[in-house]
Amino acid sequence: MSETFTIRMDGDMPLTVIDTGLSDLRWYGEELTDPVTEGSRRLYRAGLSTRAVTIHYEDDELEINLPVGSCEEDCELALGIVRRAAVHSGSPIETDHGELSLGELDDVFDADWREQQLTSAIRVAAQLVARDGGVISLPGPNRSLCLGPRLIGQLENAAPAQLVALMRRVQWPDPRYEQAGTFEATRPESLEKVTFSILLPDRDCIMPYTNRLLLRDNDDNIILIPRKALSSLPVFVTPLDDGNDLVDAIAPIAWEQVCVAARQLQVAL
């Protein structure tokens, strides 16, 4: 499962505790300054990370959270911050396994533990899919990995490296594909939330996992279809997982054919 590390910091925390100069380090959240200011950040390594390491720094206390399903590079990113924070502060490391010294850290969080970060993700997802059906989402730096019965069946007995390859394929596809916009609406009669993504012509898109798919025809009319009906349209679709798909650009001359097919599948919000 996810792991949380907490270290008491005394005085300013230098930026080198968080960032040692990795050229691929990226983050969401508060700006990283030197010394580091209070706030929350989600750190990841571009092109490598499968999950994001969350750090929260407030009242001289640094908390680092490493989610289940983190790859080797994510584990080392989190543990590197823990080590440097402990060296700088001289404080013990509070963990879900109790208080640890710096010398005990690598004994507990060793290679077997790192592998369990991946195998646990599949085990938990498989149990939830078997119990509840549907699709389980694991949020990543760019989008959520969607695991349903199809992929769970392929991954249950697979090596951890296969899960890492799948997660990286979802997080870091060919950069020519743009993330499609996602919106949320409320059904007025039931107040149920409905998500929908927008399929546009003339661009390569990553279509996320939503309830509905929205198209706009050449007369500016809106067409809503079930998201799962994407594969029924005359478009070239490459599944990334059990929810995200790559859709190749649709030429304007072919767009009307796509809209004609979509009208046959049209549904209400």
Image (cartoon, rainbow, N blue to C red):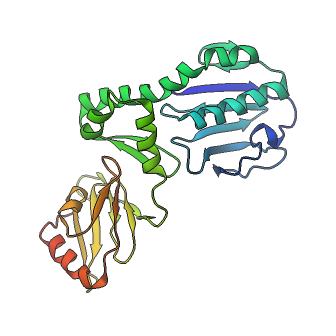
Residue 250: % across, % down = 31, 75
Residue 4: % across, % down = 60, 26
Does residue 85 appear to the left or right of 234 in the view shown? right
Q: Is residue 17 above or below residue 1?
A: below
Q: Is residue 8 above or below residue 29?
A: above
Residue beneath the point at 64% across and 50% down? 27
Q: Is residue 202 above or below residue 141?
A: below
Residue beneath the point at 60% across and 45% down? 44
Residue 80: % across, % down = 71, 32
Does residue 33 appear to the left or right of 235 in the view shown? right
Residue beneath the point at 40% across and 29% down? 159
Residue beneath the point at 29% across and 35% down? 154
Q: Nearer the viewer, residue 164 or 79?
A: 164
The image quadrant of residue 158 is: top left
* Identity of the residue furthest to the left in this view: 264
Q: Nearer the viewer, residue 12 or 235?
A: 235
Residue 233: % across, % down = 20, 67
